[in-house]
Amino acid sequence: MKKLMDKLINNIRFDKRYVLFSIVLVILGIVTGSIFVVILNNSDKSIVIEYITSFIEELKNNNFNYIETLKNTCIINYSLLIIISIIGFTYFLMPLNILILFYKSFIIGFSLSSFILAYKLKGLVISIFYIFPHLIINILLFSLLVAFTIKLSLIMIKCIIQKKQVNMRAYFNKYFSILILFAIFITITSLYESFVAPSIIKFFVKILI
């Protein structure tokens, strides 16, 4: 297993330009999501508060469904991994990956502000454990994946325009290594998000709320 992991890691190298672009996009998404909660009308804010308080009550009353959460989390994370990967091979759909990464970042920002909206400063503490470290790790993984798909798409476009032959096998091998490594991390973060994070949040909810 260790040899496999070492081989996978050695095969992965990311272009800093595209990684930086992805990280900036993530930051913009989080900031936009955070601001969006603030500019909602009172009716929409009430819906958000009701959703958050309902989630907290489920934890407090031991009604939280951990298995269902794991199932939904895995479906979402693996679906995104597969969709982004497929789009990476279709260079003309590359902007969709950018939108997906922005939207996922937007949701993180929205979640942060939603907890703060519902519980003020106490909500800030809860929101930290709601997203850290699993959602942060996930968004970083997807940022790196999107960065690689952007580079791959641009290489394909360049080959078509300049009518050059490029050995794509090396890129595809690297791509496959990335997907395997990311799938392993996503499995770990999904388990954490479904079982560990709710327990930590529940602990702090009992203290703060």
Image: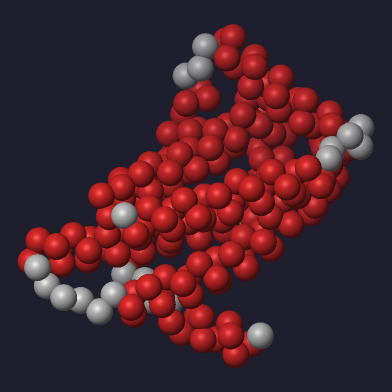
Compared with 110, 198 (above or below) is below
Query: Would residue 55 appear left or right of 157 to someone viewing this image?
Result: right
- Pick the quarter of the image with the C terminus: top right
Question: At x 46% / y 84%, what residue is drawn?
Answer: 10
Query: Would residue 63 appear left or right of 130 to someone viewing this image?
Result: right
Query: Would residue 203 appear left or right of 125 to someone viewing this image?
Result: right
Q: Position of residue 132 (x, y in %)?
A: 64, 52
Compared with 87, 167 (above or below) is below
**Whether residue 125 can be seen here:** no
Residue farthest along the right direction in this orientation: 61
Question: At x 71% / y 19%, what residue is drawn?
Answer: 50
Question: At x 68% / y 21%, what residue is drawn?
Answer: 49
**Whether residue 66 can be seen here:** yes
Total numbered circles: 0
The chosen color scheme is secondary structure
Question: At x 71% / y 51%, what residue is drawn?
Answer: 193
Q: Position of residue 124 (x, y in %)?
A: 66, 38
Q: Position of residue 139 (x, y in %)?
A: 52, 53
